Amino acid sequence: DTEVTQTPKHLVMGMTNKKSLKCEQHMGHRAMYWYKQKAKKPPELMFVYSYEKLSINESVPSRFSPECPNSSLLNLHLHALQPEDSALYLCASSQEPSGSRPNRYEQYFGPGTRLTVT
Amino acid sequence: EDQVTQSPEALRLQEGESSSLNCSYTVSGLRGLFWYRQDPGKGPEFLFTLYSAGEEKEKERLKATLTKKESFLHITAPKPEDSATYLCAVQARIQGAQKLVFGQGTRLTINP
C-alpha cells in the first residue's frame, strides 16, 4: 500500500480564519513533507520532518505552522493567510535512507488540498 | 547547485504517435532520479526511480532511461489517457535531510 491521505480535499477560508490541513500515511515512512503547488508549476517544498523532528523549513512565513504529532500524521496549521497563499497543498512521505537501503527514497504524494483564501 | 531542466514544455501527439520527453540534470552525486505523472488538480503519482547510468525501467507504454547527464521518458503508442504533466526530479541532500529538486514538467496531450 502506497497511500497518503489528505483532508480536507477543498478548503475556502477568509484571511482572519484559523484552519488546519491533515495528512496521514501508514507505510512506516519516517520522513514527511509539505509542498505548495501553483498552477502550471512544480511542487515547491515547504517543510520536511524526519523522525518527527522538523529538519527543513524553506523560509516559509510564520502564518504556516507545521506539526508532526506522531510518525503517521502531519498537520499544517494556517492562520491569517493571504489570497496569494491560494494553491494546492501536497503532503508526501518517504523512507529515510538506511545503511542497508541507502537509495530507497521515493516520495509518495497525497491527493492534495485545494486551498482558496478569500 | 542541483538543477533539473525538462523539455519540451508542452507536447501534443496523436494517439499511437510515439515520442520521448527529456530531463537533463546537474547534481553533485546522483542518489536517484524520479519520474512522476500528475493529472490536473491531483497529487503527483510515482512512476520510476533510476539510480545509475544505463538503467532502464518500463511500465505499460512508458520506458525511462538514464545517462550521466539526462533521462528520457519514452512513450510508445500513447493513448488519450496518457495525457498528463510528467515531472522529473533528482534527489539532493540538504541540511542533513533529503530533498527533491523538480523540473518544470512537460504537459503531454494525446489527441484521439
Image (tube, rainbow, N blue to C red):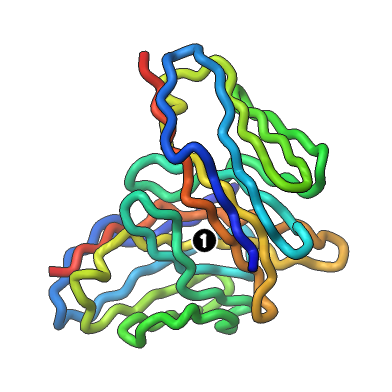
Give above or below for B42 relative to A118.
above
Q: Residue type at mark 1? A: Ala
Looking at the rendering, which quadrant does residue A43 occupy? bottom left
Q: Quadrant of the C terminus of chain B?
A: top left
* Rendered view: B57 above or below A36: above
Q: Position of residue B99 (x, y in %)?
A: 61, 67
From what the image shows, is residue B74 above or below residue A107? above
Q: On the rendered structure, is A101 left or right of A118? A: right
The residue nearer to you, when weighing A38 against A4, is A38
Question: Image quadrant for the N terminus of chain B?
Answer: bottom right
Q: Secondary structure under badge 1?
A: strand
Q: Nearer the viewer, residue A108 or A29?
A: A108
Left/right of residue A106 with respect to residue B80 in the rendered view: right
Question: In terms of depth relative to the viewer, which is nearer, B15 or A90?
Answer: B15
Chain of residue at mark 1? A
Residue positioned 62% across, 76% down in the render:
A50
Which residue lies at the image location 39% right of the left edge and 54% below the top edge?
A41
Residue A100 position, x and y percent, is 87, 62
The answer to whether B52 appears left or right of A114 in the picture is right
| Quadrant position of residue B30 | bottom right
* Residue at 39% from the left image edge and 68% from the top image edge: A22
**Which residue is more in the foreground, A31 or B109?**
B109
> Which residue in the protein does label 1 denote?
A92
